[in-house]
Image: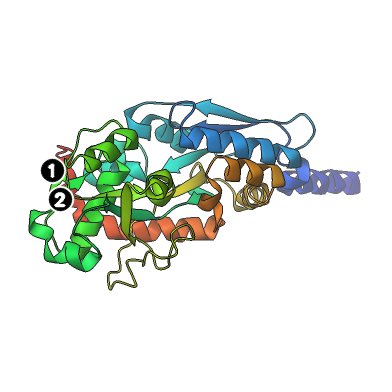
Amino acid sequence: MLAKIILTVIVALFGLSAPPSAQSQYPDKDISWIVPFAAGGGYDVWARALGRAMEKELPKGAKIVVKNVTGAGGRVGTTQLYRAKPDGYTIGMVDLGILPFQIAMGPEKAGYDLNRFSWIGVFAEAPWTIAVKKDSPLKSLKDVKTQGAKLRWGVLGPGETHWLAAMVTTGEMGIPFNIVSGYGGVSEMIPALLRGDFDLCPVLSTSALEYVKSGDLRPIAVLDDERFPAYPEVPSSKEQGFNIFSPFVRLAAAPPGTPPQIIKVLEGLLLKALKDPELRKWADSSGRGYEIVRPKGADAARTTMDEFIKVTQKYQKEMSAALQVSK
């Protein structure tokens, strides 16, 4: 009788101590993918393309279900992801454009803390290009530095990614941050540059391609340590003597506290999807092939975010003033 009781206790304890992976195989059902922007935009089309590729590795019948949770420039969806159950069945995309609000407001008011997300990987990135119109006298970052006091930078509006790139660039170069804003998108900002509303602007290298090919825009620098494959003749900011760290990366993340073994599975799904022939064909045909030149995993995503937070925190005062936030 005593032996039977002891055996029962041992079996019960063994069952309780078994890891989740031993009890159920992850993933075994649909995974929700939160996109904090509207359908049809860059993040949305990436999520759907990646979802199709990732589904090939999921159990039969399981899907990647894209959910567009819009509002407040991406902050509503980001907050929902941040507060989701950390079980691996809710993942999402994080846009660096929400970082100024966290720095200006503080994590508690912002509703999320980018330091605490469980990062899955970087699935796309494109360096910023400093662009001028074709007949501009500006030829290099040295010219920008020399004429900095009188130059006007074009951006969409306070807090967004172009604004952030321009602010970091001028800050690291030690020149005034004079902006002209109020544009609804790059499709409005580029024509404004061409008609002379301002002197220069940061624009994603991939977004500038068609304008550079047409001869309307002339890139004078790529904000990166190395040159951009589509513009091999344009020197990087590092080559020109300026260490400017202002990346545009598309990040995949899970809620804080997601178990490492689950992150490992998600990281593998993401990186394998980025090698999928059908996804690569889609990326090349849609002009997004250059964005996946250097896909990176969870550790690289964490490093990128840590470095960017460190750089941008230097501008907390400027961000708070521009966003009219009082902590």
Q: Quadrant of residue 70?
A: top left
Q: Position of residue 8 (x, y in %)?
A: 84, 43
Residue 248, placed above or below residue 95: below
The numbered dot on residue 321 is 1
Label 1 to label 2: alpha-carbon separation:
6 Å
Residue at 22 percent across and 63 percent down: it is 172
Residue at 49 percent across and 40 percent down: it is 93
Out of 231 and 294, give the one closest to the viewer: 231
Q: Is residue 33 visible?
A: yes
Residue at 24 percent across and 51 percent down: it is 166
Name the quarter where the N terminus is drawn: top right
Left or right of 104? Residue 283 is right
Left or right of 26? Residue 133 is left
Q: Position of residue 50 (x, y in %)?
A: 61, 40
Mark 1: few, some, or many residues within 10 Å (few <14, many ≥20)?
A: few
Circles 1 and 2 in contact, beta carbons < 8 Å: yes
**Label total for image:** 2
Name the quarter where the C terminus is drawn: top left
| Residue at the spot of label 2 | 317
Q: Is residue 327 visible?
A: no
Residue at 35 percent across and 49 percent down: it is 215
Mark 1 falls on what kind of element? helix
Spot the residue most to the left: 150
Mark 2: few, some, or many residues within 10 Å (few <14, many ≥20)?
A: few
Q: Amino acid at mark 2?
A: Lys
Out of 115 and 295, give the one closest to the viewer: 295
Q: Position of residue 216 (x, y in %)?
A: 32, 46
Mark 2 falls on what kind of element? helix
Q: Quadrant of residue 24?
A: top right
Q: Position of residue 107 (x, y in %)?
A: 31, 43
Q: Amino acid at mark 1?
A: Ala
